[in-house]
C-alpha cells in the first residue's frame, strides 16, 4: 500500500481495554475505532462502563490492559500530548458561579496553555461557537442549566481540541435546552471538522445526532454501527430504543450502577437547576 492509499489514522483506537474497581469489571475487553470528524455515541444503561472508558481515553484513569491511541498518539506513553488533543466536559464539571462566563472560559484558556497573546481572541471564539457572546459578561450564577452546559462546552473548546469528549452533555436539561446543546455540537463539528465522542442515555438524541454508536452493557460493546444499520439488523420499523432493549434486556430502565449513579445524576440535575 502506498502512502497515498494508507488509511487515515483513527481519531481514537481502543484495543482490549480492561478496568476493574475491586471485583467490579467496569470495562471488560472493549475494542473501538472512531473515525476523524464523526460524532460517535457511546450508549448504555447506568453502570455499563461508558464513563470508565472515557476516563481512560482522556488519560484520567490508567489502563489495566489494552491500548489506546488518540490520532495515533499513545495515551500511556504520551499522556500530556494526548491531553493537548482533547477537550473534555465531564458529568460533574462545575463552572464558578461567582465569575462571569468570559472569566470562566479565560481560566480554562490559561489552564490549557493558550498563549497569552491569543487568549482573548480564543475565549471570544469559543463563546461565539456556543452562542454565549451576549451573556459573556454576566455572572454565571444567573445562567440557566442549558447556558451552563454551553459554557462548559466553550471551556472545552477554548484550546481548539481535535477531539471533543462529552459525558452526558444533556443530562438534567429540558427538551428545548437539550436541542440547543445538540445544535451547538453539530454546528461546531460542521465549522471545525472536530471529532466528537459523546455518551448519552437518550436514544432519540443518539438516533438524531450521532453518525455511529456503540451500545455498551456490563463493560462490553454489544453492538456497533450507524443507528440505521443497527435498526435494520433488528428488523423493519425498529427504533434505536428497540435495539438497545434487545442488547441490554431490561437494563435500560433499571439502575444497575446502584446509589453512586443515582447520586451522581441527581447532583448533576440539581447543579443544572
Ligand atoms: N470510582 C469508582 N469506584 C467503584 N466503582 C466504580 C467507580 N466508578 C465506576 N464504578 C463502577 O464501575 C461500573 C461502570 O461504571 P461507569 O461509571 O463507567 O458506568 P457508566 O456507563 O458511565 O454509567 P452512568 O451512565 O451511570 O454514568 C459500575 O458498576 C460502577 O458502579
Image (spheres, rainbow, N blue to C red):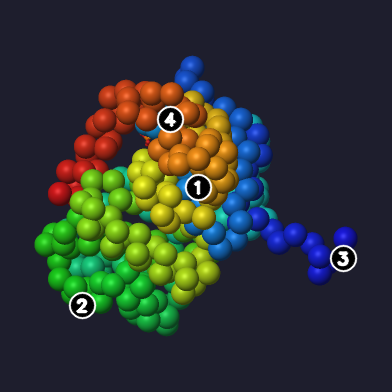
Q: Answer left or right for 83 relative to 206.
A: right
To which residue does mark 1 refer?
227
| Label 4: which secondary element | helix
Q: Residues within 10 Å of mark 3 (few under 14, many from 20)?
A: few
Residue 169 location, x and y as percent? 34, 51
Labelled disc at residue 245: 4
Depth-wise, is mark 1 or mark 3 nearer the camera?
Answer: 1
Residue 230, compared with residue 34, is above or below; it is above
Q: Would residue 2 be seen by someone viewing this image from the given angle?
A: yes
- Per the model, the C-alpha gap separating discs 2 and 1 is 36 Å
Using the image as rendered, state which of residue 57 and residue 204 is in the foreground: 204
**Quarter location, residue 6:** bottom right
Q: Do the numbered discs 1 and 3 sit on residues whose CB atoms are within 8 Å?
A: no
Using the image as rendered, state which of residue 29 and residue 78 is in the foreground: 29
| Mark sitting earlier along the chain (4/3) | 3
| Mark sitting earlier along the chain (4/1) | 1
- Outermost residue on the right side: it is 1
Instruction: Give the residue drawn at x 36%, y 47%.
Output: 204
- Per the model, the C-alpha gap separating discs 1 and 3 is 33 Å
Depth-wise, is mark 2 or mark 3 nearer the camera?
Answer: 3
Q: Do the numbered discs 2 and 3 sit on residues whose CB atoms are within 8 Å?
A: no
Q: Residues within 10 Å of mark 4 (few under 14, many from 20)?
A: some
Decide if ligand 1 comes within 8 Å of the CB at mark 3.
no
Instruction: Give the residue drawn at x 43%, y 24%.
Output: 249
| Label 2: which secondary element | helix
Amino acid at each position: 500500500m502506498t502512502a497515498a492509499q494508507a488509511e487515515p489514522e483513527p481519531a481514537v483506537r481502543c484495543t482490549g481495554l480492561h478496568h476493574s474497581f475491586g471485583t467490579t469489571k467496569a470495562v471488560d475487553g472493549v475494542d473501538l475505532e472512531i473515525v476523524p470528524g464523526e460524532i460517535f455515541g457511546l450508549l448504555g444503561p447506568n453502570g455499563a462502563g461508558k464513563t470508565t472508558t472515557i476516563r481512560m481515553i482522556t488519560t484520567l484513569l490508567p489502563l489495566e490492559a489494552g491500548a489506546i491511541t488518540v490520532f495515533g498518539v499513545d495515551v500511556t506513553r504520551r499522556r500530556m500530548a494526548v491531553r493537548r488533543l482533547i477537550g473534555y466536559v465531564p458529568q460533574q464539571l462545575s463552572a464558578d458561579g461567582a465569575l462571569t462566563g468570559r472569566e470562566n472560559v479565560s481560566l480554562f484558556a490559561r489552564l490549557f496553555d493558550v498563549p497569552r497573546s491569543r487568549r482573548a481572541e480564543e475565549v471570544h471564539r469559543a463563546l461565539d461557537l456556543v452562542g454565549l457572546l451576549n451573556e459573556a459578561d454576566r455572572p454565571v450564577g444567573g445562567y440557566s442549566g442549558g447556558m451552563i452546559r454551553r459554557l462548559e462546552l466553550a471551556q472545552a473548546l477554548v484550546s481548539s481540541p481535535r477531539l471533543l469528549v462529552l459525558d452526558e452533555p444533556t443530562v438534567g436539561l429540558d427538551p428545548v435546552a437539550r436541542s440547543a446543546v445538540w445544535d451547538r455540537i453539530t454546528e461546531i463539528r460542521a465549522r471545525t471538522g472536530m471529532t466528537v465522542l459523546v455518551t448519552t442515555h437518550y436514544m432519540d438524541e443518539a438516533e438524531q445526532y450521532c453518525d455511529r454508536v456503540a451500545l455498551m452493557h456490563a463493560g462490553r460493546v454489544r453492538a456497533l454501527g450507524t443507528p440505521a444499520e443497527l435498526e435494520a439488523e433488528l428488523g423493519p420499523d425498529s427504533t434505536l430504543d428497540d435495539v438497545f432493549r434487545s442488547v441490554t434486556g431490561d437494563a435500560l430502565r433499571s439502575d444497575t450502577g446502584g446509589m453512586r449513579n443515582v447520586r451522581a445524576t441527581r447532583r448533576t440535575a440539581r447543579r443544572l437547576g
